[in-house]
Structures are given as structure tokens and as C-alpha cells.
Image: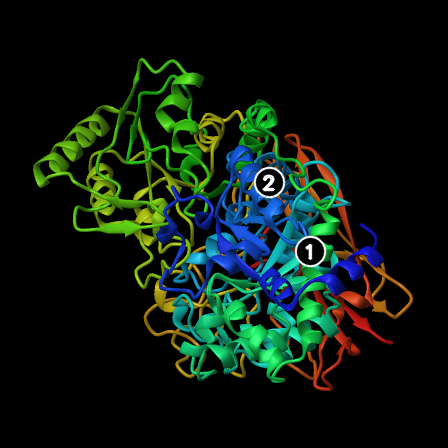
């Protein structure tokens, strides 16, 4: 449809039609078999049958046959035959599930996540969907917050690369193309910084911190062409984001140039009343509409108030037209006016979903996401001839997908025992649960599912004794333990970020009878791993690895593939450190490692300042040596560049991949700068004894920040360049910026 035709359509629509385009309802309103209580708080939201019959979009329903029927019936009865948008949270895969985003970040390969997003888009598109509520690009620094699993970490530069890559993967170059869906960058803004790590909690960030650290990755997604942005639940410096005109119109639209559709999160418009920002639903409607929120997700506040407010002169109809036009434009970009079903195809669903090509990519992504945290005595990789006891609740579990992968099905997932048996003669191996995933007193709830244990104490003890006896007889114990998939994700804030107590007991008992323990760790967030690290010779972090996770684990444990992942979120020494992140400020009294008796410094008395495992950390099956940093010049201006280089050598006896990381420190500035900031990285794969020069280019643009003049600019002065294998590197050189 041409732009002129869209304008004519808008002009011909009634006010009620336009307002209801701005309302989103769940698919259960069209499919009576669906349990809508699984989607979130479900009090009376104020919808009428007339509202539903004119609604602009639907969330929470999928399947080509189902959505085509809903669309057909809807378009036929709509006065202007305007099709609906079908939306869903397709976070790290549709039916083929990839590693959680925090794990994808550990690959340091945004282009790989772009491929994963393209596959997810294809499976979602043939199933009738038009929009995904992804990527989540919120910066995360606090492991107590369960939704860190949906982010790619604590670094604004890396998050920006992944956000842009995922947007491109979902959307391609043209939304009309086959198998492309619109992406939604979320949650705007600052959702990843809730006070005390408690979900939905207050966010208080200085303008400097907000703009320098939290906003860049959203901007990257918008620059990549994201069709939609979602508001966040939280307040930002005292004002709820969903009704925040300065944030949404000032920063998002005017400064960042976003001209797409802005949607609220689930019931977020209603929640600005509970924040104490609005007195009632009418005021919430006015505030949100004036802020530029185009779609009200599941409250009914828009459809019950906006028409009356316009007729009473309390709200301009121009605002309604503006929002409605953006929604119509998105439908047009997707080609829905020409084909209301777009890619929905029952035959293609059967061909595409979980096909070999998609599973192969899931396996590759999982392998590259694993981070080897410890490998004492080079116990990994394991020889297949060894007598191995595979122990732990994740030996048999198929729930390897993460809490947001509610479209995935456990029956499609290979478990670890099956994966091992497919790769090795298991005559000398045995497989034992050892313990339930959780204690019998714990019940977890997710999106339409619940997790509770029903084992008696006697059954638990029998499971434990069987595992301990097997461990006694084994050469090596591979202990597959960690969080349950429902222990991280939305609404899973935790002050205790250790593995479940019942699994701690399993680790304790097994490690007492066998000193060769290899822990394969499943989790959706950084954990306090002091006990795990002290009792295991090796620790392999595998996150929630997805559909092909178990096969990927077997690949890595047996050495067919060497781990190469790097942490993109620091693992704290203990929960008392959080929020903890590598790109901190020095303070006026910085702690000097090794001088712990110097009392009057910024340090803890009872624990280290440093995290247990820092940003950028990760081992492999070989070792690398990185030479001193060499600069081709020591003075940088506006027009020239500096080449910074090192030579990387594989000093081990197997091939391996190293992620060489470049950090910069602005030594003195008008606003204090982080001790290090990631600015670039390279992945290099080398054979034993092979070496390679790795070169980076530094320009003035990379040195810009929000100065005391409230402008994004660089300042003359001395800069340090660090190049190494993680954020703790002290391998550096200096240059001067003179503009």
C-alpha cells in the first residue's frame, strides 16, 4: 500500500477504530482453549467484545493454522478489513532453542547471534507470527536480578553489537521478505538496573551513567532499524518509563531518531498508577499517549478512555492519528495489506521447524557459548576410555532451554546421557541423578508451568548413595548440576545466588570420595561458585544451552571441540559484592591489591574487591602468550588513526581459539572514566606453536563520552591501551590525544 493510500485509510477510520488499533489483547480472546492466566496478572482489564473486534494486535498465540483462522475471521468482520499483528516473545529461539542470550554473549560473536535470530524468525514466521519482543539489550550488573539471562552482559559496546546483530537477524533488509519478522528492542530504558536486583524495582541512575552505559545498546538497535521498542516497567529517576515524555519523546524519538512503534510492556500503563504517578486510569491514558506510547499491552486503558478524552477536548486527536499511523505503517512494511497471513504455512512449519540445519546451528552456538572456568591438571578433555560416573540432576533432564523458551518442548531436547551414549562406548560409564533438581520444600512457577519435587527423604538418600558409590569406583566424576530453568528469568530475583542446597550436598558427598570432579554447570545468571570451585578440578559453564546443548557438552568434554567462550558478566566472589562489573571507577582511595592492611581504602574487610571470575575471562584446552602492546604512533588527532598490535602465540599442544580484547582508559577527564572500557576484540584460532599478529585501529570517535559540558565528545590527554585475554590484563601502552 502506498503512503497516500495509508493516509486515506487513516482519514476514513472512525475514532473508535483508530483507538483500538492501539490496544493489544491476548490470543485467548480468540482461542477459548488457551489459559490466559499464564500470561501475567489477569484482573478485569476493561475490554469489551467491541474492543476485541477492532483490536490492532494479538500476543501469546502461535501456529499457522490457528493464526490464519483468527486473521481470516477478524479481517472479514473488520469495517476496513485491517489485519492484526501477531506478536510473541521469541527470545533465544522459537522451537529450535539456542543458548540464553547471556550465553550467546559469551561467544563474542554477534554475527553468530544474527544467524540464530534469523533461524528463530523463520520458524516464527511460518508459524504465523509477525513480531518478536526481542532483543532485550538492558545492561546488567547485578546477578540477583533473574532477567540477566536475557541480556548479553555488563558492557555497553558488546551489548550494542549483539543488539544490532539480532535486529538484523530477525528483520533482514526488508520486512516483506519471506521469513522475516519485526524486532522489538526492550526495555526502554534502564530496566537492567533495579535497586537491590529486585525485579520491577526503582531505577536511580545519574544522567552521566544513564547515557554513557545504559542507553548506547538501545541506540544500536534503533540504528540497525528495529521496527519496535518496548517501554520498561520501572521508574527512571522518579518517573515511570511508560509515562515519561522526556524519555520517550525527548530521548527515544527526538535524539535517537526512532520513528517506529512504541509498545508498553504487559500492563505497564496501568502500573504507572501503582507507582503513584497517576491518580487513575484516565490520567494514565493521557500520560502514556502524550509520551508517545502507541500500543497498550493488555490493560484496556486506551480503549476505555481515549475516545472520550478526545471528544471532551482533553487529548488531541492528532496524537491518536500519529500512533495509529505508525501501527498501520508497520503492518504495511510487513506486507500484511497484500497478504494478511504473510509466511504462515502449515506445510513449511513441518519442514522448517527443528530441521537439521537449525539443530546444527544450535549445536554450534552452544559449543561456542561454553566458558571453561577452571581446568586443574588439564583434566579436560576426558578420554572416552576412562571410567566415568555421570552424576547430577542434569544427566537426565531435558529442560535445558531457559525460562523464556516456553515455546520450546523438552521432548525435542536430547539429554546428557543420550548425548554421551551417541559419542562413546559407555561400557565403563554409569549415569545417576544423585539428587532431585530442588529440595522437596521448593516450588517454582513459570509461564504456564510449575516445578516442584515429590521425592521422599528416603528416596533422596537412596539417589545420593547410588551416586556416591558410583563416584567411589570411577576415575572421574562429571557432575551436571546448577539452577533449575525456572530459577532465573522474569520475577526470579534471589539474594542467595548459589546452586540449590540439595545439589550442594551432592557435590560435598561426591567430592569426598573422588578428587577428580568435573562440574558442568547449568544456570541463567552468575552464581557464587566458591564451594564449587574449591571442590572441583574443572568447571565448565554451559548456561541454559538449548535444544542441542547436551550434544554440544559431549563434544567439548570429550575434546572434539575446545571451549572458547568468555564471560560477559562478572561472576561475584559473593553476593555481597553485587552489583559488580569490570568497568568501574577508580575512586579517590583505590584499593591496591596486595596491600590489604591499608585500612583506609575502598575495599571490603571480609572479601576481595575483585569478582571470582571477571568480564572477558575464559580458559581453553591450550595456552596462549600475548606480546607487549605496540603502537605505530603515540599521538592521535582528529584525522589520523593509531594501530595497536600484539602477537598472539599458541604455547600449548592443541589447537585453540583466543579472544584478544582491547580496552582503553582515559587517564584524566572532566568526568571520571572507567578503569577500562572494551573497545574492540578479535577471535584468533591457532595451531600449536603458531603465532599471529593481531592489529586494532583506534580513532578519536572511540574516545568520546558525555563530558561535563553535557556533550558527547573527546578530550585531549593521555590514554592507556590494554590488550589481553580478559579485563584484568595489565599489558598496556600509552598515547596522547591532541585535537
Q: Position of residue 364 (x, y in %)?
A: 57, 32
Residue 72 numbered mark, or none: 2
Identify the mark nearer the N-term, 1 or 2.
Answer: 2
**Tag 1 residue:** 227
Residue at left 58%, top 43%?
71
Along the line of sight, the residue nearer the viewer: 259 or 297:
297
- Give the color scheme: rainbow, by chain, secondary structure or one colour: rainbow
Between 640 and 101, which is closer to the camera in this rendering? 101
* Residue 198 found in image quarter: bottom left
Query: Is label 1 in contact with label 2 (beta carbons under 8 Å)?
Result: no
Q: Quadrant of the C terminus?
A: bottom right
The answer to whether residue 130 of the structure is visible from this angle is no
Q: Is residue 22 above or below residue 380?
A: below
Query: Would you place residue 370 above or below residue 728 in this image?
Result: above
Up the image or down, 348 lies above or below 694; here it is above
Horizontally, residue 632 falls left or right of residue 11, namely right
Q: In this orientation, does residue 69 appear?
A: yes
Q: Residue furthest left?
A: 458
Q: Residue at x 50, y 56 (%)?
A: 25
The extreme bottom residue here reads: 709
Relative to 160, is 655 above or below? above
Image coordinates of residue 206 in percent, x first then y, are: 57, 81
Q: Position of residue 670 (x, y in %)?
A: 70, 84
| Label 2 residue SS | helix
Q: Nearer the viewer, residue 13 or 716?
A: 13
Comparing labels 1 and 2, the label whose residue is closer to the camera = 2
Give the percent coordinates (x, y) of residue 689: 66, 32
Residue visible at 22% across and 39% down in the picture = 436
Residue furthest right in the image: 639
Instruction: Give the structural element (helix, strand or loop) at label 1.
Output: loop
Amino acid at each position: 500500500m502506498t503512503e497516500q493510500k495509508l493516509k486515506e485509510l487513516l482519514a476514513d477510520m472512525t475514532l473508535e477504530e483508530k483507538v483500538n488499533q492501539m490496544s493489544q489483547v491476548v490470543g485467548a480472546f480468540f482461542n477459548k482453549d488457551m489459559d490466559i492466566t499464564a500470561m501475567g496478572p489477569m484482573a478485569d482489564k476493561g475490554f469489551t467484545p467491541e474492543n476485541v473486534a477492532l483490536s490492532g494486535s494479538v500476543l501469546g498465540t502461535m501456529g499457522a493454522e490457528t493464526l490464519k483462522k483468527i486473521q481470516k475471521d477478524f479481517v472479514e468482520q473488520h469495517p476496513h478489513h485491517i489485519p492484526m499483528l501477531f506478536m510473541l516473545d521469541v527470545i533465544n529461539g522459537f522451537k529450535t532453542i539456542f543458548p540464553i542470550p547471556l550465553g550467546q554473549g559469551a561467544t563474542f560473536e554477534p554475527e553468530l547471534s544474527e544467524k540464530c535470530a534469523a533461524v528463530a524468525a523463520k520458524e516464527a514466521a511460518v508459524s504465523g507470527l509477525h513480531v518478536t519482543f526481542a532483543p532485550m539489550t538492558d545492561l546488567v550488573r547485578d546477578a540477583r536480578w533473574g532477567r540477566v539471562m536475557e541480556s548479553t552482559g555488563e558492557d555497553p559496546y558488546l551489548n550494542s553489537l549483539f543488539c544490532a546483530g539480532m535486529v538484523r537477524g530477525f528483520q533482514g533488509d526488508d520486512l516483506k521478505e519471506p521469513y522475516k519478522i519485526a524486532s522489538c528492542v526492550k526495555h526502554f530504558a534502564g530496566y537492567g538496573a533495579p535497586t537491590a536486583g529486585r525485579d520491577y524495582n526503582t531505577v536511580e541512575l545519574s544522567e552521566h551513567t544513564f547515557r554513557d552505559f545504559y542507553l548506547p545498546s538501545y541506540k544500536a538497535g534503533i540504528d540497525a532499524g528495529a521496527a519496535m521498542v518496548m517501554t520498561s516497567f520501572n521508574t527512571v529517576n522518579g518517573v515511570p518509563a511508560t509515562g515519561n515524555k522526556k524519555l520517550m519523546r525527548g530521548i527515544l524519538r527526538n535524539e535517537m531518531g526512532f520513528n517506529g512503534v512504541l509498545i508498553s510492556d504487559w500492563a505497564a500503563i496501568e502500573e504507572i498508577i501503582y507507582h503513584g504517578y497517576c491518580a487513575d486510569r484516565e490520567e494514565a491514558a493521557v500520560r502514556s499517549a502524550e509520551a508517545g506510547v502507541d500500543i497498550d499491552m493488555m490493560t484496556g486503558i486506551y480503549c476505555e478512555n481515549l475516545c472520550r478524552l478526545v471528544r471532551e477536548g482533553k487529548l488531541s486527536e492528532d496524537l491518536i492519528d500519529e500512533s495509529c499511523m505508525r501501527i498501520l505503517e508497520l503492518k504495511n512494511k510487513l506486507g500484511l495489506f497484500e497478504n494478511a497471513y504473510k509466511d504462515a504455512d502449515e506445510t513449511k512449519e513441518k519442514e522448517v521447524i527443528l530441521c537439521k540445519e537449525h539443530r546444527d546451528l544450535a549445536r554450534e552456538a552452544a559449543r561456542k557459548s561454553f566458558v571453561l572456568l577452571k581446568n586443574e591438571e588439564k583434566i579436560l578433555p576426558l578420554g572416552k576410555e576412562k571410567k566415568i560416573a555421570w552424576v547430577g540432576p542434569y544427566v537426565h533432564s531435558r529442560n535445558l532451554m531457559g525460562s523464556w523458551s516456553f515455546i520450546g518442548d523438552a521432548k525435542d531436547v536430547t539429554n546428557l546421557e543420550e548425548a554421551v551414549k551417541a559419542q562413546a562406548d559407555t561400557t565403563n560409564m554409569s549415569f545417576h541423578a544423585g539428587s532431585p533438581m530442588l529440595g522437596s520444600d521448593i516450588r517454582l512457577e513459570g509461564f504456564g508451568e510449575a516445578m516442584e519435587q515429590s521425592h521422599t527423604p528416603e528416596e533422596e538418600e537412596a539417589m545420593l548413595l547410588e551416586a556416591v558409590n558410583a563416584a567411589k569406583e570411577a576415575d572421574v566424576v562429571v557432575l551436571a548440576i546448577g539452577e533449575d530453568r525456572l530459577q532465573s528469568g522474569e520475577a526470579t530475583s534471589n539474594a542467595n545466588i548459589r546452586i540449590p542446597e540439595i545439589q550442594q550436598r551432592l557435590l560435598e558427598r561426591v567430592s569426598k570420595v573422588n578428587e577428580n570432579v568435573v562440574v558442568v554447570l547449568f544456570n541463567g545468571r552468575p552464581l557464587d561458585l566458591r564451594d564449587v570451585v574449591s571442590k572441583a578440578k574443572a568447571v565448565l559453564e554451559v548456561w541454559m544451552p538449548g535444544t542441542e546443548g547436551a550434544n554440544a557438552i559431549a563434544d567439548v568434554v570429550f575434546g572434539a571441540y575446545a571451549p572458547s567462550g568468555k564471560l560477559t558478566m562478572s561472576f561475584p566472589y559473593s553476593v555481597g559484592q553485587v552489583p559488580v562489573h569490570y568497568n568501574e571507577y577508580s575512586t579517590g582511595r583505590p584499593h591496591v591489591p596486595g596491600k590489604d592492611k591499608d585500612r583506609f581504602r575502598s575495599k571490603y574487610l571480609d572479601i576481595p574487591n575483585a569478582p571470582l571470575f571477571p568480564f572477558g575471562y575464559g580458559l581453553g584446552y591450550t595456552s596462549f602468550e600475548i606480546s607487549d602492546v605496540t603502537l605505530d604512533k603515540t599521538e592521535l588527532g582528529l584525522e589520523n588513526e593509531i594501530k595497536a598490535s600484539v602477537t598472539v602465540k599458541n604455547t600449548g599442544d592443541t589447537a585453540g581459539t583466543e579472544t584478544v580484547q582491547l580496552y582503553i582508559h582515559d587517564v584524566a577527564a572532566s568526568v571520571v572514566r572507567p578503569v577500562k572500557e572494551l573497545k574492540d576484540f578479535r577471535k584468533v584460532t591457532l595451531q600449536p606453536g603458531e603465532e599471529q599478529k593481531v592489529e586494532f585501529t583506534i580513532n578519536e570517535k572511540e574516545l568520546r563520552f558525555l563530558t561535563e559540558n553535557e556533550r558527547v565528545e573527546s578530550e585531549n590527554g593521555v590514554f592507556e591501551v590494554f590488550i589481553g585475554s580478559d579485563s584484568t590484563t595489565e599489558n598496556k601502552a600509552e598515547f596522547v590525544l591532541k585535537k
